[in-house]
Amino acid sequence: MASFILYINFAGKLTIIKIMSSNKTFTMIKPTAYKNNCAGSIIEKIYGGGFHIAAMKITQLSKEDAQKFYEVHAGRPFYDGLVEFMSSGPIVAAILEKENAVEDYRKLIGATNPEDAEEGTIRNACGTSIGENAVHGSDSDENAEIESNFFFSARERYQL
């Protein structure tokens, strides 16, 4: 989606500037990372990675919300534990913007297993296990849109 800025210069001429909005991704700081006071350092890493935060809130998923959000994993062995964990405490949900946002954020968060995550990544610094790996990050542009819409209305989003 493109944004437009309208302004009138000193000579009274109307100028329209088209600004292409950057790519976006979605993230959640998970309950254990929130409980362990990692939210601030995670947000600092997000800004340090060149991302703009377009929307952010602290909330808690009900069990039903977690089931719906993760329904793509229903039937997998880890699904019930994931639902229980993700509804166990507060999370921070956020929409992040940057060119190549999905891929760049996946690099910033690191491997799913914190033990395998590279030094300096979010999961290496704040993850405690595969299941409690500090953050969720969208795996595609399509899922970033779906996941963002799950948590945020249009009026809750800031666009550059």
Image (cartoon, rainbow, N blue to C red):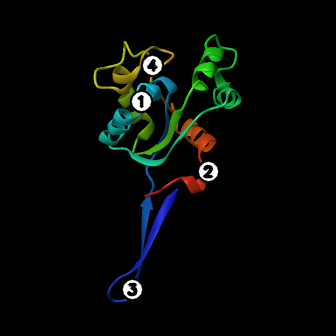
Q: Residue furthest top?
A: 77
Dots 4, 3 in contact, CB < 8 A = no
Residue placed under numbered mark 2 in the picture: 153
Determine which residue is flagged by label 4: 112
| Front disc: 2 or 3 | 2
Locate residue 60, reporting x and y percent.
59, 34
* Residue at (59% x, 46% y) in the render: 152
| Cβ atoms at labels 4 and 1 below 8 Å apart | no
Real-space Cα separation, disc 4 to disc 1, in angstroms: 10 Å
* SS under mark 4: loop
Q: Earlier in the sequence, mark 3 or mark 1?
A: 3
Three-letter residue code for mark 3: Lys
Residue at left offset 56%, top offset 53%: 156
- Tell me the element at label 1: helix
Disc on the earlier residue, 1 or 2: 1
Residue closer to the observer: 62 or 50: 62
Cα gap from disc 4 to disc 3, whole angstroms? 53 Å
| Quadrant position of residue 49 | top left
Location of mark 3 (residue): 13
Where does the image place residue 18, in percent across and percent down from the top left?
Answer: 44, 65
